[in-house]
C-alpha cells in the first residue's frame, strides 16, 4: 500500500496515524504532513564543563589563570581567543559568523544541573532541551526530527528522539535486504521482497478490518507509518560524505544528511572528557580543538550542501572551570560559563557580556548589552529567550508550557 | 508551621482510616471482585478465561458476579464519580488548596499528583461532613454561607452541587458495605486471548521462552506462572525492569561502582588490584564492580525470589553481596561457591544502618545531593518510586518570582514554595546522614534548622531515630497504601509497558465521560490487586499473577463498538513495542537462532542497534522508546531478513522432531497440504495466532510461498542459498523451497504481532 493510499485508508477507518510519520519532503509537503526546509539547529555539548578561558574568554598567565601569555591573546574582529591549538585557524576563518556570550552566571557547579541549564535555559528539572523544543515545534512527525547523541536531550514527551551517530549503520538500514550494503546481493530476491511487503500490506488492511481495540489499531498504524520512512533513509544516504572524521564530525555528517533530505530539524551532538580536574591543558585544549574542527566541518559541509544560510550552531557546556590550576595541574568546577552561537539570525563578530580578570561575571545593561556595574548578570535563560525568539517559539502557547522564568528580562540580540 | 503540621496530620489520619478500612475489607472484595472472573467452560468458539483457582477452562461467558446489593457502589467510586469530579474539584478545589485563596483554612484538598489523592480527599471531606453545627454538617453550611466562609455562599440548597455534597454527608454517616465495584459490563464486548495464548504471552514476556507442550496441555496458568517466576530468565527480566526505574546500571562499566566506595571506609575496595594474574584480576574486578552496581536490584530480586514481603526492599537491614563485592566491602560472608559471581548473600555492612535499597552506594550516588540541594532530589525520587507521588506536580500553578518575599526563607514561608517543600523537605531530612558521595556521614552540626525537621507528612521523626533515619522512613512508608499502589503500578508497567491512566480533569473534553469510566475501572482494578498483594503478605508474585490473569493483559479485540466505547477501551489490550532485550529473547525462543553478526549480538550491543532500537544506557538515555521511528522500523526489517536467512536452513538441518519452525515439511516438499500445515504452525510459533486451514491468513501466506516458489523456478536464480544463509550442510536449494520458506518467515518476523506484545 502506498503512503497516500494508506493514509486515506487509515483516515477512513478512523486509524490514528500518529508520530512518527515518515515522509519524503515532496510527498509530505504535498500532504501537509511534514517535510522540512530549515532552519536547522545543531547543539554541541562539551560534556564535563569546559574552560572558556582557554578559548573565547581568554585571560592568559596573568594571575596564573592560564599557561599561555596574556600578551599572546589574539583577536579575530571583535573576538578574542586563546593562542592554542586550532583556534587561530578557526576564529580567523569564521569570526564573522561567531557570537560569543561571556560571563554567564550558571548558579550551579553540578554537571547534570549545568547541562540542563545551558541547553534548556532552566535550572529546574522538567524542561525540554531547546533541540527537542524546536524539533517538536517544526517537525514532530519527521522520521529524524530530533537526532540526539547525548548531552541534555530531555524531550518532555514532545517528540520521539532518534539516535544516529554512527555513519556506518545507516547504509545497513537503508538497504535492509542487502547482505552487505555495498553489494547488490540480497537475502531475498527483489521479487520476494516486494511480495513480502505486499503480503504485509494486505495483512495490515485485513487487521484494520478485524481489530477494534484502538490501542492495538493505533500501534499498528504507527509501525506502518514508520515503515513508510524506510526507503527514505536512502535519501539520507546520498548526502552522507565518504571517509571518516572524528566522532563529532560523524555526528554532524549524519545530521546534515538528514537535514538535506528534509527529514530532520535539530541535532544534539556530544563530546566528553572536559572534566579535567588533573592535567588540564594537555587533556582539555585538544578537545576544544576537536569541537572547533567539527564546527568548521559543519560549515564546510553546509556550504557544499547548500544549507549554510539555514544552519544555527549552539556550542555550550555544563559550566566553566576554576580560575588557575589546582595541585594536580587541573581545574575544578566554576559556575561562570560562556556560549558560542553561530549561523542564521545570529549577530556575527559579536561579544556579549564579559568576566573580570579572575573569571567572575560582570553585569551588563539589559537595554544596551554594554558592561554596566548597575546592570544584570547574563544567565542561560537570556540566551535561550533570544534563541527561542529566533526559532519563532518565543511567545506562543507551545513554548509557554515551558516558561523561561526570567527575573530580569533582556533581549540579547535586540 | 505547627498549625500546618497538625492540619496535615489530621488529614492523613483521616485518609489512613479510609485506607485501613479498605484493607480490612480486602478479602471479601478480592473473592468477589471482577478479578476472579468466572466463565462457563463449554463453548469452544469463545475466548478462554481464568478460573479462581488459576486454571483456564477453555472458554465461556461472563457470569453474574454482583458483589453487593443491586446498584451498590463502593464509597471511593461514589466519591470519585459523584462528588470529586462534578462538584468538589470545580467548586472547592480552586481555593481550598495549598496555593489557593483558602490556603490558610483547615479545609485543604489534594490534587491528583498525590498517589492517594482519592483516599486523602475522602478523609478531608469526611471530617467536615461529620462536623455538625446545630445538627447540620459543616460541609453543607460553609458553601451555603450559613456559617463563616471566605468565599461566601457558593451553592444554594437543592442545586446540583448541594445535592452531591448532601449525598456525601449521608454516606459518611452510613458508609456502604460494598467493597468492590462490579465492572463486568465494562468488558461486555471485549474478547480475550485464550488459555494457550495467555500462557504464551506470559512465558515469553516474563521468561523469554515459549510454554512447553505439557504446560499448554495442563491449562493451569497459576502453576505455569509459579514455574516461570522461579526461573533465572524471570529474574533477568526483573533486572531490566527495575533498572528502567532505578538506572543503577550506569555503574556497570569499568570500576564505576567500586569507585563509589570511599577507600578510607572500605580500604579493601580495590583488593583485586593486587592480584598478579591479569586474567584473574580482571575477572574479579568485573565481578566485584557488577555486584556493587547491581546491589540495589539484587536486593529486590532476593526479596521476590524468597517470597519475602515486598516491604523488605525498604526495610531490609542488610544488603546483597557476591563473593567479590564481599571482599571489597570487607565483610565475612559464607558462600556455597566462593568463585561464583552469581551467588549473592545477605550481608550487613558494619557502620551502616541499612534501609533496604535506600542505603546502597548506587542509589545514593545515582540520585546525588549538594550542599544547596540538601537531599531534595533524593526526596523527590523517593516519593516518585516508592509512594507513587510526583512532587514536581504538587504545585498547580507556575511560580511567580515577583510575588516572593525573599527577605524571609521562602521554602518555609512562601506559599508558592511551601506547597512542595512542606512535603519534600521532611523526607530530605530523613536522608540527613548520607553525604554527597553517598557515604554514611552524619553531619556534625546536625540537620539544617532553616527547613522543616526530618519526618514524613506531618509525622516528625523521633530524635532517637535520627541515627537510623532512613530505617524510620522505610517503616513509615511500607505502612502507606501508596507503597502498595507504587508496587502494583510498577508490575503493570513491567507486564504491559503502559503507564497507569490519569484521572481526566477537563470535563469539557468530548471524551471526558468515557475517559473517566476507563479511569475508574482501572483504579478499581489496581485497588483490588493491591488488596490481594497485601493479603498475600506483600508477595510481589501475587501482583504479577493477578495482572496476567486480568482483562487488561488479555484483551485482544472487541466487537463492532461505537466511538464512545472506543474511547472507553482506549487503553485496553497491550501493544508494547518489544525492547531490544525482549525482542532478542523472543527471536531465540521462537526461531532457535540469535541475531548475531560478526560475532556480536546486534540487538544487545550498544554500538550496533541496542540504543537505536529504543534501548537505554542508564546514563544519558534513560527512557525506552515506545513508538518506532523510521530507523527502528528499518532495524526490524533487517532483523526479519537476516534472521530468516540464519534460521531457515539451520532449522531444516535438524531432525524433524527437534525443529522449531518446520516440523511439517522438508526441503523440496511442495505438497500443498504439508505447506499449509507448516504455515499454520508458523503462525502459532512466531505470532501466537491460531488459524483453521481455510482462513484467509493461511491463504495469504500460502500465496506468498507459492508465488516466490514459482518465481524462483523461472531460471533466474542460483541453485545455491546465499552463503550467509547456508547452515550445517545445507547449501543448495535447487527447487527454491528453502528460500520460499525464508520469505514466509521474514514476512512473519517483520509483522506487528512479532515486534509487539
Image: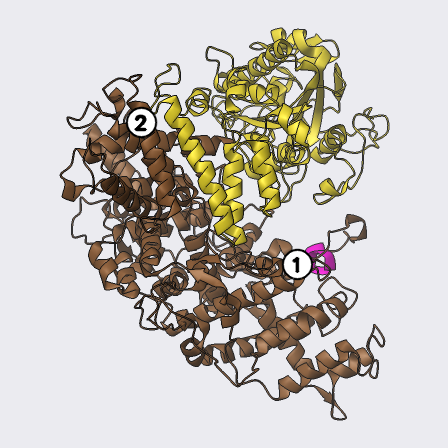
Quadrant the N terminus of chain B occupies? bottom right
Tell whether B79 sits left or right of B266: right
Residue under the point 78% across and 42% down? A407
Q: Is B270 positioned to the left or the right of B562 in the image?
A: left
**Percent x, y of residue B20:** 50, 78
Classify B626 as above or below B475.
above
Q: x, y percentage for residue B384?
A: 53, 56
Q: What is the magenta range?
A: B410-419
Chain A colour? yellow
Please name the color used to draw chain B. brown
Q: Nearer the viewer, residue B686 or B72?
A: B686
Q: Is residue A100 rendered to the left or right of residue B719?
A: right
Pointer 1 residue:
B511
Q: How many marks?
A: 2
Mark 2 lies on residue = B710
> Do the residues under discs 2 and 1 have CB atoms within 8 angstroms?
no
| B650 drawn magenta | no
Around disc 1, counting alpha carbons within 10 Å, would you say few (fewer than 14), some (14 to 19), or many (20 or more)?
some
Question: B19 or A166: which is nearer to us?
Answer: A166
In the rendered image, the vertical position of residue B125 relative to residue A321, given as above or below? below
Tag in front: 2 or 1: 2
Write down the quadrant of residue B108 in the picture: bottom right
Local SS, label 1: loop
Circle 2 crowding by C-alpha within 10 Å: few under 14, some 14–19, many from 20:
some
Q: Which mark is residue A396?
A: none
Amino acid at each position: 500500500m502506498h503512503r497516500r493510499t494508506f493514509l486515506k485508508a487509515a483516515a477512513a477507518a478512523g486509524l490514528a496515524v500518529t508520530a512518527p510519520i515518515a515522509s519524503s519532503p515532496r510527498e509530505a509537503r504535498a500532504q501537509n504532513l511534514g517535510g522540512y526546509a530549515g532552519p536547522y539547529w545543531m547543539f554541541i555539548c562539551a560534556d564535563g564543563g569546559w574552560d572558556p578561558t582557554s578559548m573565547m574568554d581568554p585571560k592568559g598567565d596573568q594571575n596564573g589563570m592560564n599557561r599561555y601569555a596574556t600578551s599572546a591573546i589574539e583577536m579575530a574582529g571583535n573576538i578574542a581567543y586563546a593562542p592554542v591549538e586550532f583556534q587561530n585557524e578557526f576564529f580567523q576563518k569564521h569570526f564573522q559568523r561567531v557570537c560569543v556570550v561571556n560571563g554567564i552566571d550558571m548558579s550551579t557547579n553540578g554537571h547534570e544541573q549545568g547541562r540542563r541549564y545551558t541547553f534548556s535555559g532552566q535550572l529546574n528539572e522538567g524542561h525540554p532541551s531547546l533541540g527537542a523544543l524546536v524539533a517538536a515545534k517544526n517537525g514532530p512527525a519527521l522520521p529524524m526530527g530530533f537526532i540526539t547523541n547525548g548531552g541534555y536531550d530531555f524531550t518532555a514527551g514532545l517528540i520521539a528522539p532518534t539516535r544516529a551517530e554512527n555513519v556506518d549503520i545507516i547504509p545497513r538500514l537503508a538497504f535492509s535486504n542487502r547482505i552487505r550494503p555495498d553489494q547488490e546481493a540480497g537475502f531475498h530476491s527483489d521479487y520476494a521482497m516486494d511480495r513480502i511487503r505486499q503480503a504485509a500490506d494486505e495483512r495490515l488492511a485485513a487487521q484494520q478490518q478485524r481489530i477494534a481495540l484502538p490501542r492495538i489499531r493505533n500501534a499498528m498504524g504507527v509501525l506502518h507509518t514508520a515503515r513508510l520512512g524506510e526507503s527514505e533513509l536512502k535519501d539520507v544516504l546520498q548526502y552522507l560524505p565518504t571517509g571518516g572524521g572524528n566522532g563529532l564530525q560523524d555526528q554532524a555528517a549524519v545530521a546534515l544528511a538528514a537535514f538535506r533530505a528534509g527529514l530532520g530539524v535539530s541535532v544534539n551532538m556530544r563530546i566528553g572528557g572536559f572534566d579535567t580536574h588533573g592535567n588540564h591543558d594537555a587533556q582539555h585544549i585538544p578537545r576544544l580543538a576537536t569541537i572547533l574542527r567539527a564546527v568548521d566541518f559543519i560549515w564546510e559541509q553546509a556550504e557544499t550542501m547548500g544549507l549554510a544560510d539555514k544552519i544555527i550552531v549552539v556550542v555550550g557546556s555544563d559550566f566553566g572551570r576554576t580560575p588557575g590550576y589546582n595541585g594536580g595541574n587541573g581545574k575544578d568546577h566554576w559556575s561562570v560559563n560562556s556560549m558560542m552561537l553561530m549561523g542564521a539570525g545570529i549577530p556575527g563578530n559579536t561579544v556579549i557580556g564579559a568576566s573580570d580578570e579572575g573569571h567572575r561575571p560582570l553585569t551588563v545593561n539589559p537595554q544596551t548589552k554594554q558592561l554596566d556595574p548597575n546592570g544584570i548578570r547574563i544567565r542561560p535563560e537570556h540566551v535561550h529567550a533570544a534563541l527561542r525568539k529566533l526559532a519563532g517559539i518565543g511567545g506562543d502557547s507551545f513554548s509557554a508550557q515551558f516558561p523561561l522564568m526570567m527575573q530580569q528580562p533582556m533581549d540579547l540580540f535586540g | 508551621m505547627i498549625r500546618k503540621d497538625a492540619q496535615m496530620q489530621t488529614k492523613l489520619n483521616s485518609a489512613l482510616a479510609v485506607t485501613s478500612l479498605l484493607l480490612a475489607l480486602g478479602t471479601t472484595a478480592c473473592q468477589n471482585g471482577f478479578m476472579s472472573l468466572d466463565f462457563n467452560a463449554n463453548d469452544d468458539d469463545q475466548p478462554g478465561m481464568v478460573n479462581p483457582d488459576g486454571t483456564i477452562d477453555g472458554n465461556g461467558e461472563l457470569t453474574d458476579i454482583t458483589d453487593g446489593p443491586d446498584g451498590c457502589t463502593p464509597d471511593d467510586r461514589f466519591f470519585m464519580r459523584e462528588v470529586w469530579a462534578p462538584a468538589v474539584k470545580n467548586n472547592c478545589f480552586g481555593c481550598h488548596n495549598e496555593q489557593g485563596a483558602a490556603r490558610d483554612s483547615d479545609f485543604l484538598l489534594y490534587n491528583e499528583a498525590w498517589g492517594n489523592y482519592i483516599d486523602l480527599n475522602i478523609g478531608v471531606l469526611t471530617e467536615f461532613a461529620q462536623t455538625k453545627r446545630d445538627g447540620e454538617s459543616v460541609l453543607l453550611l460553609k458553601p451555603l454561607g450559613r456559617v463563616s466562609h471566605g468565599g461566601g455562599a457558593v451553592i444554594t440548597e437543592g442545586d446540583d452541587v448541594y445535592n452531591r455534597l448532601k449525598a456525601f454527608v449521608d454516606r459518611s454517616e452510613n458508609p456502604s458495605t460494598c467493597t468492590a465495584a462490579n465492572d463486568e459490563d465494562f468488558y461486555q464486548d471485549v474478547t480475550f486471548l485464550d488459555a494457550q495464548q495467555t500462557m504464551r504471552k506470559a512465558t515469553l514476556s516474563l521468561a523469554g521462552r515459549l510454554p512447553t507442550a505439557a504446560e499448554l496441555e495442563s491449562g493451569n496458568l497459576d502453576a505455569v506462572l509459579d514455574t516461570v517466576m522461579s526461573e533465572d530468565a524471570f529474574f533477568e527480566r526483573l533486572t531490566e525492569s527495575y533498572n528502567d526505574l532505578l538506572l543503577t546500571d550506569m555503574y556497570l562499566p569499568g570500576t564505576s561502582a567500586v569507585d563509589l566506595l570511599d577507600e578510607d571506609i572500605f580500604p579493601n575496595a580495590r583488593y583485586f588490584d593486587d592480584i598478579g594474574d591479569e586474567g584473574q584480576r580482571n575477572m574479579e574486578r568485573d565481578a566485584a564492580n557488577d555486584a556493587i552496581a547491581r546491589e540495589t536490584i539484587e536486593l529486590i530480586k532476593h526479596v521476590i525470589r524468597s517470597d519475602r514481603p515486598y516491604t523488605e526492599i525498604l526495610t531490609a537491614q542488610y544488603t546483597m553481596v557476591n563473593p567479590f563485592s564481599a571482599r571489597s566491602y570487607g565483610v565475612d560472608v559464607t558462600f556455597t561457591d566462593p568463585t561464583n559471581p552469581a551467588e549473592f548473600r545477605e550481608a550487613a555492612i558494619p557502620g551502616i544502618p541499612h534501609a533496604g535499597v535506600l542505603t546502597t552506594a548506587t542509589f545514593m550516588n545515582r540520585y546525588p545531593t549538594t550542599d544547596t540541594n540538601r537531599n531534595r532530589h533524593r526526596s523527590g525520587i523517593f516519593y516518585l518510586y516508592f509512594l507513587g507521588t510526583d512532587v514536581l506536580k504538587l504545585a498547580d500553578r507556575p511560580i511567580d518570582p515577583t510575588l516572593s518575599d525573599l527577605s524571609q526563607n521562602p521554602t518555609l514561608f512562601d506559599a508558592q514554595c511551601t506547597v512542595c517543600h512542606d512535603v519534600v523537605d521532611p523526607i530530605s531530612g530523613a536522608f540527613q546522614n548520607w553525604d554527597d558521595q553517598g557515604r554514611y556521614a552524619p553531619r556534625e552540626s546536625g540537620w539544617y534548622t532553616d527547613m522543616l525537621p526530618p519526618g514524613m507528612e506531618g509525622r516528625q521523626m523521633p530524635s532517637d531515630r535520627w541515627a537510623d533515619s532512613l530505617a524510620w522512613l522505610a517503616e513509615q512508608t511500607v505502612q502507606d497504601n501508596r507503597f502498595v499502589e507504587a508496587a502494583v503500578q510498577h508490575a503493570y508497567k513491567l507486564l504491559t509497558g503502559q503507564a497507569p491512566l490519569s484521572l481526566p480533569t477537563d470535563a469539557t473534553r468530548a471524551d471526558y465521560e468515557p475517559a473517566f469510566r476507563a479511569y475508574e475501572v482501572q483504579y478499581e482494578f489496581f485497588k483490588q490487586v493491591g488488596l490481594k498483594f497485601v493479603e498475600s503478605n506483600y508477595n510481589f508474585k501475587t501482583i504479577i499473577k493477578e495482572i496476567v490473569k486480568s482483562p487488561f493483559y488479555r484483551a485482544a479485540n472487541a466487537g463492532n463498538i461505537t466511538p464512545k466505547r472506543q474511547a472507553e477501551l482506549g487503553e485496553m489490550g497491550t501493544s508494547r513495542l518489544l525492547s531490544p532485550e525482549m525482542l532478542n529473547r523472543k527471536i531465540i525462543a521462537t526461531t532457535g537462532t540469535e541475531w548475531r553478526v560478526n560475532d556480536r549480538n546486534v540487538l544487545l550491543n550498544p554500538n550496533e542497534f541496542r540504543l537505536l532500537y529504543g534501548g537505554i544506557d542508564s546514563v544519558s538515555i534513560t527512557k525506552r522508546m515506545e513508538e518506532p521511528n523510521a530507523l527502528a522500523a528499518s532495524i526490524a526489517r533487517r532483523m526479519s531478513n537476516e534472521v530468516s536467512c540464519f534460521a531457515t536452513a539451520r532449522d531444516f538441518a535438524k531432525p524433524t522432531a527437534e525443529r522449531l519452525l518446520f516440523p511439517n515439511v522438508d526441503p523440496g516438499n511442495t505438497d500443498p497440504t504439508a505447506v499449509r500445515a507448516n504455515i499454520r504452525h508458523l503462525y502459532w510459533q512466531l505470532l501466537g495466532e491460531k488459524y483453521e486451514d481455510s482462513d484467509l491468513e493461511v491463504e495469504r501466506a500460502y500465496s506468498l510461498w507459492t508465488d516466490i516458489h514459482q518465481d524462483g523456478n523461472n531460471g533466474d536464480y542460483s541453485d545455491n542459498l546465499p552463503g550467509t544463509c547456508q547452515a550445517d550442510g545445507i547449501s543448495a536449494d535447487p527447487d527454491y523451497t528453502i528460500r520460499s520458506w525464508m520469505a514466509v518467515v521474514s514476512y512473519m518476523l517483520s509483522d506487528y504481532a512479532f515486534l509487539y506484545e
